[in-house]
Image (cartoon, coloured by chain):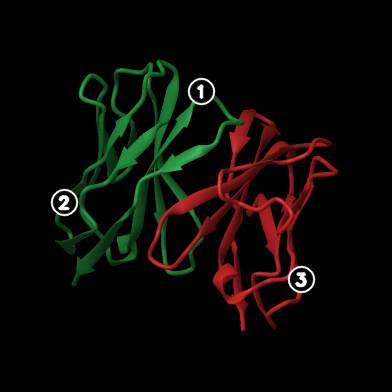
Chain colours: A green, B red
Amino acid sequence: AQTVTQSQPEMSVQEAETVTLSCTYDTSESDYYLFWYKQPPSRQMILVIRQEAYKQQNATENRFSVNFQKAAKSFSLKISDSQLGDAAMYFCAYRRGVTGNQFYFGTGTSLTVIP
Amino acid sequence: GAVVSQHPSWVICKSGTSVKIECRSLDFQATTMFWYRQFPKQSLMLMATSNEGSKATYEQGVEKDKFLINHASLTLSTLTVTSAHPEDSSFYICSPAGVRRGGETQYFGPGTRLLVL
């Protein structure tokens, strides 16, 4: 079974600074996708960024970028120029193959942004 | 705009009653529906998977007779919590997967908070 591990239950960052959230995963599959989801207090899951395993280039979405180390099975999220609105729970997730397969989630990292 | 809706967003019920939660995919055909449950300060855990027109497949430890899932159409799936008890109080999230213009896609609904008294 696939497992996703987030070893940082809580993180904090000063506004405008950069923070990195860690995630490791375990799989024997070759075709998979990795995701970072943000869950604010409303609890709506919001997609932050997605990485296809076959792509070597790290995904980037504005202030959010990932460091995907396939051999090490590591998938960290870097948030640059942190904003107050970034405060939320962040979940790392794995999905085998394309749409139609379940997500496996990590335990989450609660991010606090300090003004 | 939102592509997945859940109704109700909040429900409080008495122990022993049944509660139905609806999940609608608004502008795409959901060939597969996932139902997740999230307890406070925990992660999302898959409860069951259903394909349109087929019986749902339940994860280990999830009672199929307690959590009834219907996926009769490509835009609607329902989760019914039968004879609810306080330990069923949780946040339930649907995740439809299917085909939308532009390709395959998978989303999460806004969730339903269930409180059983």
In percent of width and height, residue B22 lies at 75, 59
For mark 2, name the chain: A
- Give the distance between the C-alpha atoms of the residues marked 2 and 1, in whole angstroms: 31 Å
Residue at the image position 34 percent from the left and 39 percent from the top = A4
In percent of width and height, residue B78 lies at 76, 55
- For label 3, the residue is B18
Q: Which mark is residue A97?
A: 1
- For label 2, the residue is A18
Dot 3 crowding, Cα within 10 Å, few <14, some 14–19, many 20+ = some
Q: Nearer the viewer, mark 3 or mark 2?
A: 3
Q: In the depicted view, which residue is nearer to us: B90 or A76?
A: B90
- Give the distance between the C-alpha atoms of the residues marked 3 and 2, in whole angstroms: 47 Å
Q: Which of the 4 image quadrants contains residue A89?
A: bottom left
In percent of width and height, residue A44 lies at 51, 60
Residue A61 seen in this snapshot: no
Q: Nearer the viewer, mark 3 or mark 1?
A: 3
For mark 1, name the chain: A
